Structures are given as structure tokens and as C-alpha cells.
Image: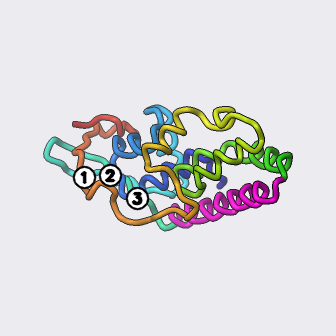
């Protein structure tokens, strides 16, 4: 299955330890309906598992990445790292035309590169400067704001470490029907 960039971002958020809908949504900035569809697709493809647990205020739903999902995420991160290296190499060689073409080809992956910290934001802005273009023609203001609030990005890779919020629970609840993840306390 070919995953879409937002699917990869959601998988990454879950692997970071965001197990509840609200935490995933806060991390990814994806609208409720779209996130529900992405989560359903990820579950259908066995990239995530959905667990219903008893909570203080009723049922709560927790999401976890599966081995299949983790392998797919690793594959996609490797792919976006490779694409970033290509763009970086074109910048360093001074080939404006090929760089612009490569950036156009990978336009949909730029937010994913930012989310996982694959791209160096300073280098990225210098690429636009070299081409005499505005960064906003490739990346939305929302994605740029997300990159800035996430502490920017480095030229390294993604971290698959533990929970970013110290494992705190937000006690979500559900009526049990489908993927109504967005109901919570």
C-alpha cells in the first residue's frame, strides 16, 4: 500500500507515543474528519491497532502502531531522507533549475520532511533564496508555523523514542460507534 504524506505524519505521531485522538490531532494539526478517515485507513491496512479500554469516565480508545506500521514508517522516513539529500545536493551544486524541478516533484512531502525533522530549515530557506522564490509558494503558512513551534528541524532523522508528553492520559471517551475518536474529557 502506498501511504500518503499525512498518513505517515499520523503514524509518526502515534509512534512518538500519542495514543489518543486529541493528542494526535494536536501534534499533526489535521482536521477532525480527515484524521478520522486517515485512522480508519491505517487500521484497515493493519498499520495501527485500536484498543478500547475502561476509563474513569467510561470507555476510552487508545491507538498503537503495529510492526507492519512501524516498518512502513521506517521505509517512508528513509525515502524522504533520500529526497532531501537529493535537493540538498542540487542546492550545493548550484543547479537552480534542477533544484526547482525536484522541489516541485516533492512538494507534497515537504510538510512530512518538516514534521520528522529531516530537513534543515536554514538550508531550505537558502534554497528559496537561491531560486529567487518565496517559501510560501511551496509550503503553507500553517506548515511553517508547525515547524517553528516544533522547534524547527535538523538535518538528522526522525526519533522513534517514547511518549513526548510523559505518558499523561487525556481520558478520552467514545460511544463505541465506529471511529468517533474526537469525543473526550
Secondary structure state at the residue bearing disc 1: strand
* Residue under the image location 67 percent in, 47 percent down: 126
Tell me where residue 106 appears, x and y as whole percent: 72, 47
**Residue 100 placement (x, y as % from top left):** 79, 44
Disc 1 and disc 2 in contact, CB within 8 angstroms: yes
Point out the tag, 3 or 2, that comes first from the N-terminus: 3
Residue 86 sits in quarter:
bottom right
Q: Secondary structure at mark 3?
A: loop
**Is the residue 109 above or below the residue 46 in the image?**
above
Q: Which residue is mark 3?
A: 16
User: Circle 2 is placed at which residue position?
Assistant: 62
Which quarter of the picture shows residue 104?
A: top right
Give the label on residue 53, or none. Answer: 1
Q: Earlier in the sequence, mark 1 or mark 2?
A: 1
In the image, which residues are magenta? 68-94
Q: Is residue 85 left or right of 120 when viewed as pictured? A: right
Quarter of the image containing the N terminus? bottom right
Q: Is residue 121 left or right of residue 166?
A: right
Closest to the observer, 29 or 38? 29
Question: Is residue 36 in view from this perspective?
Answer: no
Residue ID at (76%, 59%): 92
Amino acid at each position: 500500500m502506498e501511504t500518503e504524506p499525512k498518513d505517515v505524519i499520523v503514524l509518526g505521531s502515534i509512534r512518538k507515543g500519542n495514543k489518543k485522538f486529541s493528542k494526535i490531532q494536536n501534534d499533526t494539526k489535521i482536521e477532525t474528519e480527515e484524521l478520522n478517515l486517515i485512522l480508519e485507513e491505517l487500521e484497515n491496512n493493519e498499520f495501527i491497532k485500536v484498543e478500547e479500554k475502561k476509563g474513569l469516565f467510561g470507555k476510552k480508545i487508545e491507538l498503537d502502531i503495529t510492526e507492519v506500521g512501524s516498518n512502513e514508517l521506517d521505509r517512508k522516513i528513509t525515502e524522504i531522507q533520500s529526497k532531501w539529500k537529493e535537493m540538498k545536493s542540487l542546492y550545493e551544486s548550484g543547479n537552480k533549475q534542477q533544484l526547482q524541478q525536484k522541489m516541485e516533484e516533492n512538494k507534497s512531502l515537504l510538510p512530512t520532511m518538516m514534521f520528522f525533522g529531516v530537513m534543515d530549515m536554514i538550508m531550505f530557506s537558502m534554497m528559496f533564496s537561491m531560486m529567487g522564490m518565496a517559501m510560501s509558494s511551496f509550503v503553507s503558512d500553517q506548515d511553517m508555523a508547525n515547524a517553528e513551534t516544533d522547534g524547527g528541524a535538523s538535518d538528522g532523522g526522525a526519533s522513534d523514542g517514547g511518549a513526548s508528553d510523559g505518558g499523561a492520559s487525556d481520558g478520552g471517551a467514545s460511544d463505541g460507534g465506529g471511529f468517533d475518536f474526537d469525543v473526550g474529557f
